[in-house]
Image: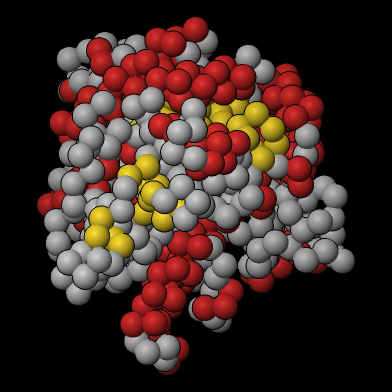
Amino acid sequence: MSSFPVEKTWWKEAVVYQIYPASYLDSNGDGLGDIPGIISKVPYIKSLGVDAIWLSPIFASPQKDMGYDVADYRSIHAPYGTINEVQTLIEKLHANNIRILMDLVVNHTSDQHAWFKESRSSKSSAKRQWYIWRDAKYDEMGNRKEPNNWKSIFGGSAWVFDEGSDQYYLALFLPSQPDLNWENADMRKATHDDMRFWLDRGVDGFRIDSMNLMSKHPDLPDGKIVNPDEPYQSGAEFFASGPKMHDYIREIRTEVLDHYDVMTVGELGFTKDEKSVRQYVAKDRHELNMLFTGDIVDMDFGANAKYERDDFHPRKIRHITNMWQKAMPKFNGWNTIYLDNHDSGRSLSRYASDAPQHRSNAAKMMATYMTTLSGTPFMLAGQEIGMANLGKDYGAESYIDVEGKNYYNEVLKNRGGNVEKMNDVLREMQLKSRDHGRLPMQWDNSPHAGFTVESAQPWMTVNKDFTEWNVASQLDDPNSIMAYWKQILALRKAYKDLLVYGSYTALDESETGEMVLGYERESSETGQKAVVLLNFSNQSQQVTVQRYEGFKVLISNQSGDGIVKEEVELQSYGAVVLLSA
Ligand code: TEU
């Protein structure tokens, strides 16, 4: 139990709804979602009972990485709309008591950013030091080589040679996403100004992209050779959570954020141990409000590569959930609760089931997880209707995102270009491709799911299951996934001393069985308890609940609710929340 009294803040009580702008709603028939589309859906967003949206990048960008390659942080990607429309969106959200978080992408920019163009123009450019430039190395034969052996997160070398200025620049993602040099104080100041630009326009905080990659080891040492057969190796040990990381965040806090009432959530990659995590979010560190540690969306990633196989098992979610629920209160930190984002497959299809007979119950079970833990829930648009991955009948050609495509093509090349040998990789893409998290929103059963007009070509495949799984079909159905979300989000608010601020105690696996995740929450104000039981399997499970005799069912996705006796029978993907008197 926490030794701190939990301080109450709006961002702890908020539920955040992530919107991927390309995929929400197209208002002008070009096949791409846009800002006016989101504006028209503010009443819908409000009706769900969420308190904030996180908008993935909407800024001017060549869209090599769907806007995570920013060319100008102060203007809007024209097909999405105008800055005035963004202002209208902010105002309309605020008028409905909904806050807005923007994506702050400042580990790198696009190579089309004016800063980079100037930086690459010559070695003596005033902005040369705003990016990370190094001289080439040469082997004994005199062949030019990269400054170190780091592998890019999206494949190939992390270094790009610039013929014009005869040096390499570092790009941890795509070659067109050069990493900024945070050592440079002028660059940092310019970035702080960009942040203020949006905060002064009413933005309520930031999700900070690739947050902990901003500080690299100053010597940029070679990564350990783990795969001797490969030319490039992971350099994560030297580019993640480097020595100046905390200085940069604190500077952002004191220079910028502390002058506004805002929240921050940092994306923390490659750093997952409690001690390091603590340093970013312990209250006394004065750094970030919360983090995405990533482990919850990586549970089925392979040991060496995302698209290698390592099947989900409920023990993984038990381990990760217990770890962070127990850890955060120790240092007065705060959790994020999430299962989905735009960087992977839908959790419903990966960790539960989208099979027709299970889909509705499984989505409600996952909704129960998302709303009964200590932390700020972040749901991905579409979760409220149980959107799922593209089915197995979509082949490799349906996947368009660079991350998956690069990996697929690299493996294909190593296997002599034989597509027949690619079924294992395709299987993993069907589970984890970033495309699934970015599928167009399914509004109704009209052509293209109502995402865009019939005559348009949607930028991304619309999942053909939309005829059955869409917003319109669930709006008036009291048994729908959406109705369940609305109900449980309202309960989270009504019981916030318990469900938001209450303490967390794990139920032991010996008590629940290995397929069931169980935990208790307890209000420090009233002593009231909630017990949550989540069945992550397609078999029914019995859980003995003698010690909770007399508790009543607060919410459940199965029939036969009532007063609890000795045992709870969880149906496949069943979820039951019990409440003490
Ligand atoms: O993601 C950072 C990141 O590390 C991801 O590449 C992640 O490892 C991968 O997607 C897992 O499948 C952020 C953004 O969320 C992502 O969309 C961007 O592509 C990336 O940064 C570069 O900005």
Which residue appears at 22% of the width and 25% of the height?
A: 279
Instruction: Please tell me which residue lies in front, 80 or 264.
Output: 80
Reply above or below: 19 against 497.
Answer: below
Reply above or below: 267 against 313.
Answer: above
Q: Is residue 148 visible?
A: yes
Count numbered badges in the picture.
0
Reply above or below: 285 against 130.
Answer: above
Quadrant, the C terminus:
top left
Query: Which percent across, then down, holds residue 456?
Result: 82, 64
Residue 550 image-quadrant placement: top left
Colour mode? secondary structure
Instruction: Please tell me which residue lies in front, 535 or 257.
Output: 257
Q: Is residue 227 visible?
A: no
Reply above or below: 121 against 89.
Answer: below
Residue 293 image-quadrant placement: top left
Instruction: Please tell me which residue lies in front, 576 or 380.
Output: 380
Query: Which percent across, then down, holds residue 95?
Result: 73, 19
> Horizontal placement of 368 versus 518: left or right?
right
> Horizontal placement of 578 versus 47: left or right?
left
Query: Which percent across, then down, holds residue 360?
Result: 53, 59
Which residue appears at 72% of the width and 50% of the height?
A: 33
Which residue appears at 41% of the width and 55% of the height?
A: 160
> Horizontal placement of 394 versus 522: left or right?
right
Residue 351 image-quadrant placement: bottom left
Query: Which percent across, then down, holds residue 443?
Result: 73, 54
> Horizontal placement of 87 versus 157: left or right?
right
- Residue at the outermost top position: 259
Quadrant, the N terminus:
top left
